[in-house]
Image (cartoon, rainbow, N blue to C red):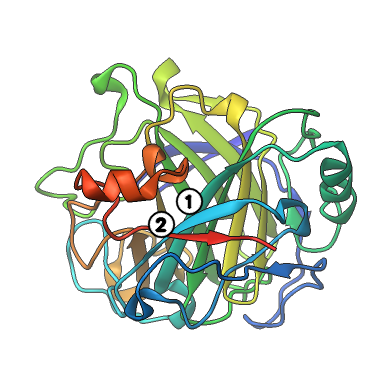
């Protein structure tokens, strides 16, 4: 593997998982079919969503838990004002849920979202999901359409940061010089990242920092479709998971530390850190009891049909 430096994450190793030719942002690759999330409303009218995320049909019958994110809250890790304001980086919704597809649904998932299918990004070894294995699905909805195709000279990053518990010393920490660090309090990152040079492809990697910043071989798969980013991560890779947070970044390649040429967003969050998380306890039902106990107050549950 080749290694490179990525802002906020340190050394990153990866192999191109999906070759993409240079094209204007927004051209997009052909995508497999998606199922839009239908609403089984358990929230007041003011909390309802005007646009629901799209998810693989294999998860129909499950439930997903969502938090709205503030509009126009682009930020940068060092707190400096950003020079770009890209709608497809402005996160409006973050959702997550745990699923254990039966054999039929898993077969459909593997067939419709197989590694190598247009728009699907897998790890270099293209590992298959294990039958009977639980899956964490994370999806973020942005204010504008996202593309799998990057214009030459630009780079993008879509990250699921995870608190895996364990030794607090293994977790990233915000500092006075990095107040908006999206991985603050987290010790795992599952990420879809543009390759260098920009336009040559996207890479998938996972970093479990509990073991000396170890890059693991992941089965996770990622899709960018319309306004949505979707990640499916095996629960077996997330032992000890406590909470998640999503972040995305887009800007000029070679100017990774220059906020004047970049922008990013963190969800759940706001314009500035410290940022909250979406706790695992909020993804396992019993929301009414949790809300009565003062937890998961803004989380909205939706059924998938």
Q: Residue furthest left?
A: 176
Vertical order, 78 against 45 (above or below):
above
Instruction: Determine whether, in the image, residue 47 is placed left or right of residue 218.
Output: left
Residue for point 76% across, 56% down: 120
Residue 43: % across, % down: 38, 68
Quarter that holds the C terminus: bottom right
Q: Quadrant of residue 195?
A: bottom right
Q: Quadrant of residue 91?
A: bottom left
Q: Residues within 10 Å of mark 1 (few under 14, many from 20)?
A: many
> From mark 2 to mark 1, how far is it between C-alphas?
5 Å
Residue 77: % across, % down: 25, 56
Observer-nearest residue: 289 or 159?
Answer: 289
Observer-nearest residue: 106 or 27?
Answer: 106
Q: Where residue 247 is drawn, which disc sits there?
A: 2
Residue for point 27% across, 50% down: 291
Instruction: Determine whether, in the image, residue 122 is placed left or right of residue 301.
Output: right
Residue for point 65% across, 28% down: 217
Vertical order, 270 against 274 (above or below):
below
Vertical order, 10 against 16 (above or below):
above
Do we see residue 129 in this rendering? yes
Q: Are marks 2 and 1 in contact (CB under 8 Å)?
A: yes
- Number of marks drawn: 2
Residue 231: % across, % down: 61, 51
Residue assigned mark 1: 159
Observer-nearest residue: 48 or 128?
Answer: 48
Residue for point 55% across, 72% down: 153
Label 1: state its secondary structure: strand
Q: Where residue 112 is drawn, which disc sits there?
A: none
| Dot 2 or dot 1, earlier in sequence | 1
Instruction: Determine whether, in the image, residue 4 is placed left or right of residue 220.
Output: left
Residue 303: % across, % down: 59, 60
């Amino acid at each position: 593997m080749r290694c490179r430096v990525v802002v906020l994450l340190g050394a990153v190793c990866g192999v191109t998982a999906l070759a993409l030719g240079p094209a204007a942002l927004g051209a997009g690759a052909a995508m497999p079919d998606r199922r839009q999330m239908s609403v089984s409303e358990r929230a007041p009218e003011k909390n309802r969503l005007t646009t629901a995320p799209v998810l693989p049909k294999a998860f129909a019958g499950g439930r997903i838990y969502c938090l709205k994110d503030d509009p126009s809250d682009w930020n940068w890790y060092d707190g400096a004002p950003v020079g770009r304001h890209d709608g497809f980086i402005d996160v409006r919704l973050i959702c997550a849920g745990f699923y254990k597809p039966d054999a039929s649904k898993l077969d459909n998932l593997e067939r419709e979202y197989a590694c190598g299918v247009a728009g699907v990004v897998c790890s270099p070894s293209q590992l298959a999901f294990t039958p009977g294995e639980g899956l964490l699905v994370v999806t973020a909805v942005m204010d504008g359409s996202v593309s799998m195709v990057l214009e030459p000279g630009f780079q993008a990053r879509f990250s699921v940061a995870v608190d895996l518990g364990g030794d607090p010393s293994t977790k990233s920490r915000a500092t006075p010089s990095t107040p908006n660090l999206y991985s603050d309090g987290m010790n795992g990152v599952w990420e879809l990242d543009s390759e260098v040079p920009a336009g040559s492809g996207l890479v998938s990697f996972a970093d479990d920092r509990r073991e000396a910043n170890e890059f693991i071989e992941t089965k996770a798969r990622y899709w960018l479709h319309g306004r949505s980013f979707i990640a499916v991560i095996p629960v077996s890779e997330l032992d000890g998971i406590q909470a998640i947070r999503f972040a995305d970044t887009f800007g000029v390649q070679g100017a990774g530390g220059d906020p004047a040429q970049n922008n990013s967003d963190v969800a759940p969050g706001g314009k500035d850190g410290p940022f909250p998380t979406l706790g695992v306890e909020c993804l396992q039902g019993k929301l009414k009891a949790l809300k009565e106990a003062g937890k998961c107050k803004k989380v909205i549950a939706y059924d998938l049909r």
